[in-house]
Image (cartoon, grey):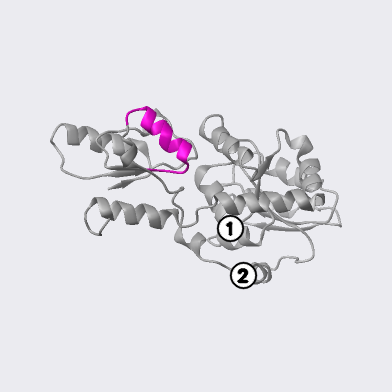
């Protein structure tokens, strides 16, 4: 059993302790920092996003030999290299300016319209791609907006080709959820962090900022200014991209499965 949430791991551990279930299990954490709720013994292996996350599990009693730093498992499509120019052409995007991808989650909730207008305040010409997910009303509302003539804008609803859009993007504007962040890193884009939820998302934000792989807009009023400043500073942007490549782990899911199979004795360790 491979768990990506602590609740089923807790249930299985409890049943194993009571001798009511004979099932080996491993747990893959899905944020860049761990916490006490992830520790549910007996568990045969723990896979973390960072060495720091593994150390914190060990602090709560998990044997060091049972912890592995693999990264956060994401869809295998993000491990397959794609040509950025092909992705740009396929989705009809402008290739003569920076491309900014604005995410809103699968259901298109949050201050999406305010972020949209904040990004339109960027001074230099950009190609803005805004994803509204399954929120059709939001898509209709944004389609009615008239952006400044210097910008090109594409509003899209739900898509299964987000990996291609991330590959095309220079910057991705998003909340720093563990999976979304890992996908952005895997595609080599720099994240612009907005509105992290206190707790795990704020800790994910800390991890990206500590590693120089993102910038953060603390308020939407200055979002356009911060993005514009970054796009004008090529040296800084290049360094951020290099840091993204350094911490990205696009094959995390493969490593988790390979090590989980070793636990089950299906492969040699």
Nearer-the-camera pick, 224 or 112: 224
Up/down of 206 relative to 2, above or below: above
| Horizontal and vertical percent position of residue 144 | 75, 53
Give the Cα separation between the discs numbered 1 and 2: 11 Å
Quadrant position of residue 217: top right
Q: Is residue 14 above or below residue 252?
A: above
Q: Where is 60 relative to 72, above or below?
A: above
Classified by dominant secondary structure, the portion drawn in magenta counts as helix
Q: Secondary structure at mark 2?
A: loop
Within 10 angstroms of label 2, few (less than 14), some, or many (20 or more) residues?
few
Horizontal side, residue 45 vs residue 72: left or right: left
The x, y position of residue 109, in whole percent, is 59, 42
Q: Which residues, given as a range, are shown in magenta?
A: 47-61
Q: Which residue is nearer to you in this view: 174 or 117?
A: 174
Q: Which mark is drawn over residue 24? A: none
114 left or right, relative to 53: right
Label 1 sits on residue: 187
- As helix, strand or loop, the secondary structure at mark 1 comes to loop
> What residue do we see at 30% from left, 38% from top?
9
Residue 120 versus residue 20: which sits nearer the camera?
20
Label 1 with label 2: CB-CB less than 8 Å: no
| Residue lying at 44% horizontally and 43% vertically, measured from the top left | 30
Query: Can you tell which quarter of the image residue 196 is in?
Result: top right
**Quadrant where the C terminus is found in the figure:** bottom left
Of all residues, the one furthest to the left in this rendering is: 19
- Which sits earlier in the primary sequence, circle 1 or circle 2? 2
Give left or right: position of 151 versus 80: right
Q: Which residue is denoted by mark 2 in the rendering?
A: 83
Question: Residue 118, how many percent across, how many down?
Answer: 77, 43
* Label 1: how many Cα within 10 Å (few below 14, some 14–19, many 20+): many
| Residue 50 part of the magenta segment | yes
């Amino acid at each position: 059993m491979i768990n990506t949430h602590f609740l089923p791991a807790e249930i299985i551990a409890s049943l194993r302790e009571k001798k009511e279930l004979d099932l080996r299990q491993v747990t893959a954490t899905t944020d860049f920092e761990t916490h006490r709720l992830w520790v549910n013994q007996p568990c045969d292996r723990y896979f973390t996003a960072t060495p720091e996350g593994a150390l914190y599990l060990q602090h709560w009693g998990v044997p060091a030999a049972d912890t592995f730093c693999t990264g956060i498992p994401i869809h295998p499509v993000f491990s397959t290299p794609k040509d950025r120019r092909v992705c740009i052409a396929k989705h009809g995007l402008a290739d003569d300016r920076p491309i900014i991808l604005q995410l809103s989650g699968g259901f298109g909730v949050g201050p999406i319209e305010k972020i949209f207008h904040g990004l339109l305040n960027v001074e230099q010409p950009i190609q803005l791609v805004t994803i509204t997910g399954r929120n059709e009303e939001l898509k209709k509302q944004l389609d009615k907006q008239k952006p400044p003539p210097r910008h090109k804008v594409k509003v899209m609803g739900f898509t299964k080709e987000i990996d291609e859009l991330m590959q095309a993007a220079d910057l991705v504007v998003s909340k720093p959820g563990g999976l979304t962040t890992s996908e952005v890193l895997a595609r080599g884009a720099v994240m612009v962090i907005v509105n992290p939820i206190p707790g795990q998302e704020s800790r994910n934000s800390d991890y990206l900022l500590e590693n120089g792989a993102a910038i953060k807009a603390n308020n939407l009023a200055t979002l356009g200014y911060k993005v514009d400043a970054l796009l004008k500073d090529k040296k800084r942007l290049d360094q951020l991209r290099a840091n993204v490549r350094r911490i990205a782990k696009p094959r995390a899911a493969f490593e988790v499965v390979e090590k989980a199979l070793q636990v089950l004795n299906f492969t040699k360790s």
